[in-house]
Amino acid sequence: MQRAVLGLCVSLAACTPLAADSDEPDEPVTSVTVAPRGTPYALSPWRWIAITAPHLAPSIGALGISGLDVAAGRAEAPLRVLGEGTAPPDWPFALDEGLRAPALPAATADERVAVGYGITTFSLGDGDRGVEMLELRVRYTDGLIAWINGVPVARRSLGVELAPTSLALRPHGPEWETFYIPVVPSLLRAGVNTLAIEVHPSARNDAPALAAELYGRSDRGILRGPIVAAVGATTARIAVETDLNTDASIEWGVGGALDQKAASPPGHHHSFELANLPVKGVVRYRVRGGATQSPIYAFHTAPAAGDVIRIGIYGDVRGGHAVHKKLVDQMLAEPLDLVAVTGDMVLHGSDEADWQRFFTITAPLVAQVPYLPAVGNHDLGWDGADTARNANEVFTLPPGPPDRPAGTNWYSLDVGDVHLVFLDSNAYERPEQETWLAADLVAARARGVRAIIAFTHDGPYSRGYHRGNGIARQRYVPILVQHHVDYVFSGHDHLYQRGEAGGLRYAVTGGGGASLYGFSCGVSGKPACKLDDGMIAIAREHHYAVLTLTAKTLELCVRKPDGRLLEPCSRAPLWRP
């Protein structure tokens, strides 16, 4: 895709890493810098005006961000608590020349900055008449609205009923986010154009921050994917996301030729169902979207009953992009049948910016291997309770039971004759999940499956910061043991631990990139563990694992980011009636 750059960083202060928030220890923020693409257009200096307000006490900030005062009919309370102010006249078209400033101000000891209003201009000439799409790339704290020539083109974390001092509904993390904006008639004009951005902090921050770039391109194309969404013995489903109102097509074949084709009409999300594929065969394919095309990728159809099955396993990436990239590169070299993730793929699942970064790193992996997650608490957004876009919307997960409550994410599937169960640790307290799990495992054993492997985010045993989940131990482990589940894998604690407790083999694989946790008990300098967790091996290392299932045994090999074994591979027999 050819892009022209129309942007700059708002200020030196705004270009430094934005602060992240975490309720857990030792959580670094990885600042990702992406080099500008193309040649910058000449921009006018930014002009800013800010409204200040009193600092918020923590309890008042929580009240303001919750919206409970408005829901209770106390419409004036937010203004008294948050301070008052007036937007610039004619906003978003102009700023008073006498009040303009070259950068957003910082908070002071006496006041916070409640909102910033900024304007810059850019010029388009005859050579820009063919621009089809704009990409507004921003790094901000915490909510924003953007306009081009007075037309709103982007909005995040700000309600429709917006007062000048309104708080952003949620914090925004440190990643750059790109908004894809179709160029419709009258959006752009020859000559001078105006970009205006209004930015608000959340209750967690005392001032907004912004870095912004604007790109133009003359074509439409692929934004995300392709993704191997499902693979069967002779079928597959490939998904791809394009710019709005863009057509897509796929070519595929066995051997050297891509002699099969299918098309998808103009749209945003495209799904291709491939049939009559070779049993245990390799399929090569390429996806086109608008004026762009993917590389040629390859995947293999699902293994059959009794075949060796290899599953890549890792979890807890969050903001650890450099480590994550190394793990993905290592897994690409493994002949995997699928990848199972133990959750927390991103830092904040409600931040589209996090998912954009995640899919940039995993692109070659998800294009060739089915990728199945157990949804973690961070995948659900800030504090695990966000209603914004999160993992269950980003991924097209296998269907759960028809009566599964909305907002929950447990499911299962068979790969050959191996049954995989993905639990939702965010919903452990739901009795529906326990009932489903017991019935699902009964049905799997009745079918005579070779093995049952379970995945969850917050597992029953760990010597890390979280120390294992009590509900998982008390209510779920007995069900797993009763039905002879061969292994359960979890994350949540950022370490590696392997053991066997109460007849259940388990491993904690939380070394996907997030900052590593120390051990809470059972090692030198720490108290003895109160719980007998049957720990066999433990390490504070980033890692991924490969579980290999043969006809009668399983083997677990755990590797560091450089490919070296973390410990000798361990083997165990599969359960037999």
Image (cartoon, rainbow, N blue to C red):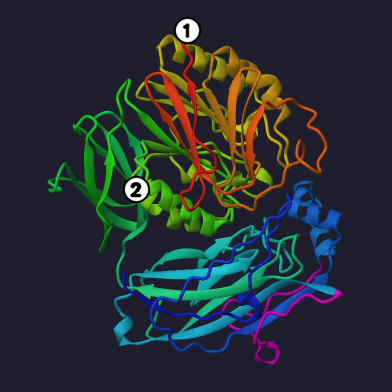
Of the two numbered discs 1 and 2 in the rendering, the one whose residue sits closer to the viewer: 1
Secondary structure under badge 1? loop
Residue 325 coordinates in the image, percent (x, y): 47, 56
Residue at left offset 47%, top offset 19%: 573
Residue 126 coordinates in the image, percent (x, y): 30, 86
One can see residue 456 in this view = no
The Cα atoms of the two marked residues, 1 and 2, are separated by 38 Å
Of 80 and 272, which appears nearest the observer? 272
Of 455 and 406, which appears nearest the observer? 455
Of 534 and 281, which appears nearest the observer? 534
Q: Amino acid at mark 1?
A: Pro
- Residue 444 lies, with reference to residue 508, above or below; the image says above
Is residue 261 inside the magenta stretch? no
Say which quarter of the image contains residue 92.
Answer: bottom right
Q: Point out the stretch of residues depicted in magenta.
A: 83-110
Query: In which quadrant is the N terminus drawn?
Result: bottom left
Q: Which residue is mark 2?
A: 367
Q: Which residue is mark 1?
A: 577
Residue 443 coordinates in the image, percent (x, y): 46, 13
Is residue 101 inside the magenta stretch? yes
Residue 504 coordinates in the image, percent (x, y): 60, 21
One can see residue 415 in this view = yes
